């Protein structure tokens, strides 16, 4: 599908040469000045599409009433009104209103949590301002800005392309066409449809390959994307398969309960001879009591709070279902550089055909000398040092900056380390760049593993090509080496041995080579760079593991999650770093070449034992994920490059790097790591497990309230006695419990064993058999307690009002105690930690006690709720029921722990019940 632009007055940027566009927008190739940009920003507004139209607050509020239970309640309000019980009518209407308000507020909270997360994923763009490259938020772009695009970028505005280098753009967001389109700056016909405008790059499309510069011609709503106004959803709606399943189950249960309530009404009225009005109210009471109407909202908010907590810890969830999957992840496949390691690179060794040097200093600070064995060497006295320094300074796209004695790198850290080395060697950066102007370049891509730049020589007589890259790769491109007395034939065996020796120390190795031309080949083609080179030497770069990654790997192993490292580096480097990280496996390293030799079936077997993969490229990642999944593993996979997208999509949880990752990788992922750190993934797994635990706890906590109230009413009807709890009291209990207690479990911190138990089986039911049993057990204890006290009071001749007040207080107090049981599914809640560990639970319980005191003693409540004051000894009984619930559940938990421990047979991954 292609679309024509809707606005007939818009200039036809694609039909005119780029120079016309510059003139029309009063811009130059050096970019705008700051003042000019600020003025245009004020005029055009930020480059941002308006968020999708949200329903108005009133609509969202009214939506709270669109629920079958609310219809039942409204019908019963009308009926009680007609029957002449205005107080009941008012109370029911009041409760319906309060419920709607609570639902409205909760929904708003969940939505704003998501909106905040959306903001964290905002786009950045590389822009030329005043001739300087600058990274800016894409929102600050204005017409006339010059934007630089690289592979993996999302195009931040509509651009008239100025220069392109093998640029291919995937425009599916705009045209629906998944195949990437090649782009070049030449103007096209005025009537070319959108998909054929090769000289334009449109906002929201993805650069799949190559590089380009382009002039911003339209921003925000003026872009083609803005015109068709389909904002690409960064974060989906607040729903997941699990939440949908619960909502579906809720609707089914509601239907069933309404059926039972209707049946009860029919039986009570026709067979038991109750008055129809009384029986109608009992049936309504039953329906209200049994339907867990607040549960879906509690689940949603538990989810939202969990997702917010993950975002605070630098794991931004783009697709919510991933949170469920996280808890069952069994394998994490992680990149090495920057994720498991610090990405703070320092060149530590240099090696030529005869001499080797070590380099002192750590980090980007250009301080540190050169040594051979233990003797200091002056760089001026060692030609190899100067030659390597010049080559790596010129074949480099990074920028080293000093600010208040703090040295930082803009660009690739590997290249930053090389700039530092050049300065340590005494090279004058500006003078060298000036004397050797760059004519052309081939950028580094992990597929071809080298970078090449072509420079004019200072005397202007010819050109030199400098190449740096993975040593085996560069070695294959060389035919000669720089010897002590000039060029000599290449001795590959000698170099291979040196490469192994450096890599075995955990250093990432680069080879540096050059080729001289009398006539510069323009444009520079890969064929010019890939043969006939002269090898100058090797560099060994240190990139130590992140200390927190070492701990995180251990935590993952304790949690039954295997960690596999997949790196583009050399096998020996990978092994050395893996050892430092404590990665297990067979000690064997599989390389990309090995993977290519294996059949799918063989790979499926090998992948189970091997934890380290070297010289692996993105296609290998895809095969690894597939092989692991064929073994029924649930795989989380990290990635940053545009070519990682297929593997990220294929993985059960794709994890993109927020800082160094491309937009293409982020789009393909479920989770984005703001700090690129492996430890964050491990923490996200723990959070994922905690969210799942808390959802489970919320269900197992809430259902007994419904179970006990429903069985109280059914029991009374069967026994033919007065109802121990009236419909309005049922409404009261549901409301106060929902407001004060149910949400407390959403704030529950992770249990101490959360990362010491094996991953959850993906197919495991949310509420397992024994948890369903606990719901029944607690419902029964609560029913017996409340009904018992009610009957006791009646037998002692007190009023029905007082007996009901007692029964309701017993029920609520039981729930308060049970909340503290529910904080730990298996572990004991006895002790200080069990009671004060979650402040929200304490606060909720305190609030509920106050509400119940009001319910019992306020004259207004006596009228509205039909309650009566209680004496001290009655409160003791109430406390007795609560304590009984607590003790019974703790005994049940202890029995369960023993059973599980027996079943686990003392396996190391058994639960920790501390
Ligand atoms: P990981 O997969 O662990 O994150 P990586 O992505 O850094 O590793 P690549 O970037 O694919 O791995 O690098 C592979 C090899 O290419 C490195 O071992 C190094 O020899 C070489 N290399 C890395 N960066 C550059 C660069 N900027 N220029 C030239 N060669 C490079």
Image: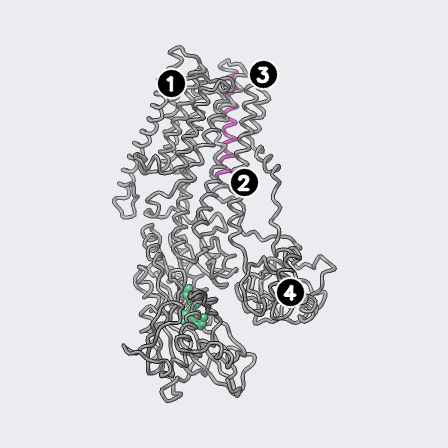
Which is more toward the observer, 422 or 702?
422
**Inter-mark Cα distance, 2 to 4:** 39 Å
The residue pinned by badge 3 equals: 83
Residue 693: x and y in percent read 39, 41
* 593 w.r.t. 353: above or below: above
Verify CB contact (< 8 Å) between mark 2 and mark 4: no
Identify the element where label 1 is drawn.
Answer: helix
- Disc with the residue nearer the chain's start (2 vs 4): 2
Q: Which mark is residue 144?
A: 4
Residue drawn where x is 40% and y is 87% of the image: 487
Q: Which residues are magenta?
A: 244-269
User: Can see residue 834?
Assistant: yes
Residue reaching furthest top? 797
Which is more toward the observer, 386 or 431?
431
Q: Is residue 471 left or right of residue 275?
A: left
**Inter-mark Cα distance, 3 to 1:** 30 Å
The residue pinned by badge 2 equals: 108
Residue 248: x and y in percent read 51, 38
The residue pinned by badge 1 equals: 789
Which is more toward the observer, 420 or 463?
420
């Amino acid at each position: 599908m292609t679309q024509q632009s809707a606005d007939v007055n818009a200039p036809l940027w694609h039909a005119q040469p780029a120079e016309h566009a510059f003139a029309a927008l009063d811009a130059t190739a050096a970019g705008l000045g700051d003042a000019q940009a600020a003025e245009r920003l004020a005029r055009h507004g930020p480059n941002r599409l308006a968020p999708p139209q949200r329903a108005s607050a009133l609509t969202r509020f009214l939506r709270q009433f669109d629920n079958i239970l609310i219809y039942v309640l409204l019908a019963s309000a009308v009926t009680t009104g007609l029957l002449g019980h205005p107080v009941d009518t008012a109370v029911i209407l009041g409760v319906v209103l309060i419920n709607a308000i609570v639902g409205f507020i909760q929904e708003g909270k969940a939505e704003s949590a998501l909106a905040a997360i959306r903001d964290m994923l905002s786009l950045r763009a590389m822009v030329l301002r005043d001739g300087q490259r600058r990274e800016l938020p894409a929102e600050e772009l204005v017409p006339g800005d010059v934007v630089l695009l690289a592979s993996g970028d999302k195009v931040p505005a509509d651009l008239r392309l100025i220069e392109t280098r093998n640029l291919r753009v995937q425009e599916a967001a705009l045209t629906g066409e998944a195949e990437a389109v090649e782009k070049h700056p030449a103007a096209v016909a005025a009537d070319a449809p959108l998909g054929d405008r090769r000289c334009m790059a449109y906002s929201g499309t993805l650069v799949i390959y190559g590089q380009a510069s382009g002039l911003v011609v339209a921003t925000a709503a003026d872009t083609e994307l803005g015109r068709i106004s389909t904002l690409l959803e960064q974060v989906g709606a607040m729903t997941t398969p699990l939440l949908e399943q619960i909502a579906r189950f809720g609707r089914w249960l509601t239907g069933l309960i309404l059926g039972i309530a209707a049946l009860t009404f029919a039986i009570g009225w026709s067979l038991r001879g109750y008055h129809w009005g009384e029986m109608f109210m009992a049936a309504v009471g039953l329906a209200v009591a049994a339907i867990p109407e607040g549960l879906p909202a509690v689940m949603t908010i538990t989810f939202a709070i969990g997702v917010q907590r993950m975002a605070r810890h630098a794991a931004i969830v783009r697709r919510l279902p991933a949170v469920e999957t996280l808890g069952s992840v069994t394998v994490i496949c992680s990149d090495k550089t920057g994720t498991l390691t610090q990405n703070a690179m320092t060149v530590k060794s240099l090696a030529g055909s005869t001499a080797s040097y070590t380099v002192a200093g750590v980090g980007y600070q250009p301080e540190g000398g050169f040594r051979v064995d233990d003797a200091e060497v002056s760089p001026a006295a060692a030609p190899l040092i100067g030659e390597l320094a010049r080559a790596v300074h010129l074949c480099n796209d990074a920028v080293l900056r000093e600010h208040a004695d703090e040295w930082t790198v803009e660009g690739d850290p590997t290249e930053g380390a090389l700039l530092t080395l050049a300065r340590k060697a005494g090279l004058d950066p500006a003078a060298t760049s000036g004397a050797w102007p760059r004519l052309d370049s081939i950028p580094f891509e992990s597929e071809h593993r080298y970078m090449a730049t072509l420079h004019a020589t200072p005397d202007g007589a010819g050109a030199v090509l400098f190449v740096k890259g993975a040593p085996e790769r560069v070695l294959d491109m060389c035919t000669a080496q720089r010897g002590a007395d000039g060029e000599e034939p290449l001795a590959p065996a000698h170099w291979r041995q040196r490469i192994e020796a450096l890599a075995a120390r955990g250093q990432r190795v680069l080879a540096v080579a050059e080729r001289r031309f009398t006539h510069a080949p323009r444009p520079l083609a890969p064929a010019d760079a890939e043969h006939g080179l002269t090898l100058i030497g090797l560099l060994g770069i240190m990139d130590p593991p992140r200390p927190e990654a070492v701990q995180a790997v251990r935590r993952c192993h304790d949690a039954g999650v295997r960690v596999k490292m997949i790196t583009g580096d050399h096998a020996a480097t990978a092994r050395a770093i893996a050892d430092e990280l404590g990665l297990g496996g067979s000690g064997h390293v599989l390389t990309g070449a090995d993977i290519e030799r294996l059949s799918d079936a063989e790979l499926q077997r090998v992948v189970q034992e091997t934890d380290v993969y070297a010289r692996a490229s993105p296609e290998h990642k895809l095969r690894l994920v597939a092989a692991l999944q064929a073994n029924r593993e649930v795989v989380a996979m990290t990635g940053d490059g545009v070519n990682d997208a297929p593997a990220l999509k294929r993985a059960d949880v794709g994890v993109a790097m927020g800082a160094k990752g491309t937009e293409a990788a982020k789009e393909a992922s479920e989770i984005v790591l703001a700090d690129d750190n492996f430890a964050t993934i491990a923490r996200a797994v723990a959070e994922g497990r905690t969210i799942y635990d808390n959802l489970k706890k919320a269900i197992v906590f809430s259902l007994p309230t419904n179970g006990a109230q429903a069985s109280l009413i059914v029991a009374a009807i069967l026994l033919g006695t007065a109802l121990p709890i009236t419909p309005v009291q049922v409404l009261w209990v549901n409301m106060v419990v929902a407001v004060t207690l149910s949400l407390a479990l959403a704030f529950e911190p992770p249990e101490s064993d959360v990362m010491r138990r094996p991953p959850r089986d993906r197919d495991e039911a949310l509420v397992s058999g024994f948890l369903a049993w606990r719901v029944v057990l607690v419902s029964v204890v609560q029913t017996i307690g409340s009904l018992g006290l009610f009957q006791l009071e009646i037998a002692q001749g007190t009023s029905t009002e007082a007996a009901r007040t007692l029964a309701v207080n017993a029920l609520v107090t039981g729930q308060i105690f049970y909340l503290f049981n529910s904080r730990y599914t298996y572990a004991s809640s006895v002790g200080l930690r069990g009671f004060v560990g979650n402040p929200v639970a304490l606060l909720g319980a305190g609030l509920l006690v106050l509400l119940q005191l009001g319910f019992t003693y306020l004259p207004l409540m006596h009228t509205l709720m039909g309650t009566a004051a209680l004496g001290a000894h009655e409160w003791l009984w109430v406390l007795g029921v609560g304590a009984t619930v607590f003790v019974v559940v703790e005994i049940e938990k202890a029995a369960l722990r023993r059973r599980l421990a027996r079943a686990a047979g003392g396996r190391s991954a058994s639960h920790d019940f501390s």
